[in-house]
Structures are given as C-alpha cells and as structure tokens.
Amino acid sequence: MLKVDLHCHSNVSDGVLAPSAVAAHARKAGVDVWALTDHDEVDGVAAARIAAQDLGMRFVSGVEISITWAKETVHIVGLQVDETNPALLAGLARTRAGRDARGREMAAQLATVGIPDAYEGALKYVGNPDLMSRTHFARYLIEIGACANVPEVFKKYLTEGKPGYVPHSWASLADAVGWIRGAGGVAVIAHPGRYKFNQMAQGVLFDEFKQLGGTAIEVVTGSHTPDQYAVYAQLANQYGFLASRGTDFHAPGEARIDFSLLPPLPANVTPIWHDWF
C-alpha cells in the first residue's frame, strides 16, 4: 500500500524547514507519494519536486489557498496544479496582499496586553515576507514564554475574541476552485472538521464546493481526531467526494501527528490518487 501525504508546508509559507528538508523528513518516515502545499504560494514547488525525485518519491505539485466563506477562513488545497499557470499566480499574489498590514495590527493588539515587539519577533520566523501568519506569531509567543505550546497560544491569543486576532478577507470559494481547475488541478477542502460550522452550514459549503467543480475532502489529516476519520469518510461518500490524506506538517515536533504516525484512509472511501499512477 502506498503511503501518501498530500498536505504539508515548508518555510516558503509558515513551515520551518526548506522544501528539500521537508521532502527528506517525509521520505525518512516512509512516505511514497508527497505533495508540498504551501499557503497561497507555489515558489517552493520546483525545489520540492527535485528533492522528491532525488529521494525516490512520487511528487504532486500543490498549494493551499485561503478563502473567506460565511465570514470564516477556510482552506482549499489544490493538487496536480501547474505552478506556472498565470491566472493561478496572479490569484495567489492577490490573496497574499495585505498580510503585512494585518501582521502589524496583530502586533499592536498584543502590545496592549503587555507583549511588545511581536511584529519583529514573528518576523524572525518568516521565510517569505509576503506570508506572515498567526503561526509565526505563535512561535514567537512560545519563544518568549508567554505560552508553552501552539494549542495554548490559540486558547489565549490570535483567535476571535482574543488579543491579536485580526480578520482578513481572503479569496472566494469560486476564485480558489477556479484558479486550481484552470491550472489543471483538483480542489480539496482541507481539514473540514476544523471549521466551526454547524451541520447545515457544512452541508451548504460541501454543496457549493461540488457545484463549482470541487473534487475531494480531507478525511485523514493531522487536525482531525480519530473519531472524525469515520465521520468524514461517510460524508465523502454521501456527497460523492474522493478522499484525501495529509499530515498538515509544519515542523518536527510541532504537529499533533507526524508523517510516520498518520493512519491510512478508511477502506470505504476512494482515494483522490486512485487513478494517478
């Protein structure tokens, strides 16, 4: 059975390791098929492809696009995309715009609760200046001892109603799916169990995604709990989606689950990669 991981990040977005180092980490854990899916950026894809080929892994070009849907941030993964597609590149550039100003406002809020210089602190962890994110601020808050780990950060800061939370209007669902399909790729809803939608809203999201040409949802992913694997397997079948799998890896020791520990997809779903090889 192929060990497939179709969701992870490098320092081109909010990961810690360079694309080649992520590839090596995945391969060491036994991954056979690997995708790099950096947030709103494809600059790491070429290096990732070379590294994967050198390591004997099959490579899938990818990206994770931030969208705003029902006033919430949702992530759409694009797989098998042509990373040189002009419309995709232009759309991603528009999506990245405004992150710096947002970061400065996040830092200003943190300063009012006794955490100064958070912008400069977060900037130390940023590999791509266009992609400052909450993850970079979280790493800085851990560094200075304000929190012990990432889950504690997001309990105390950077989420709605907490200091450091600044909403941002991203691309639309139609934009993201359109860019991905226009670049020859397939669209996947990332970690659907992570969003705070009730059953009705989630159903509306899935229906709209399918109507726009969306292909799959992530069933087994690092931010799903084991009981959610079965839930989203059932929903994938109910809505006629293929199933995807990925750790959502950002850094060694930072995620709930690493490459070597993520379980396979349930047997009752059709993997998104079923006809790729």
Image (cartoon, rainbow, N blue to C red):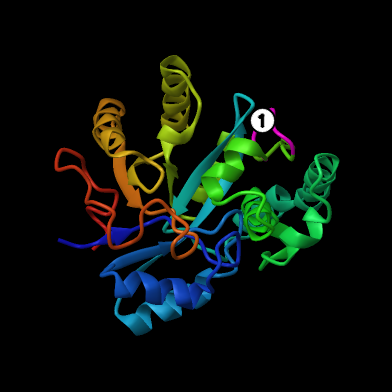
At which x and y percent is residue 144?
Answer: 69, 58
User: Residue at (56%, 67%) from the top-left corner?
Assistant: 16
Quick check: 226 above or below 60?
above
Magenta stretch bounds: 158-163
Front in this rendered view, residue 180 or 250 = 250
Query: Is residue 136 highlighted in magenta?
Result: no
At which x and y percent is residue 223?
Answer: 41, 43
Front in this rendered view, residue 259 or 150 = 150
Rendering quarter of residue 126: bottom right
Q: Amino acid at mark 1?
A: Glu
Query: Is residue 160 highlighted in magenta?
Result: yes
Q: Identify the image quadrant of the N terminus.
A: bottom left
Front in this rendered view, residue 47 or 225 = 225
User: Callout 1 environment at 10 Å: few (<14), some (14 to 19), or many (20+)?
Assistant: few
**Magenta region, main secondary structure:** loop
At which x and y percent is residue 71?
Answer: 64, 26
* Residue for badge 1: 160
User: Residue at (58%, 61%) from the top-left corner?
Assistant: 85
User: Residue at (50%, 61%) from the top-left corner?
Assistant: 9
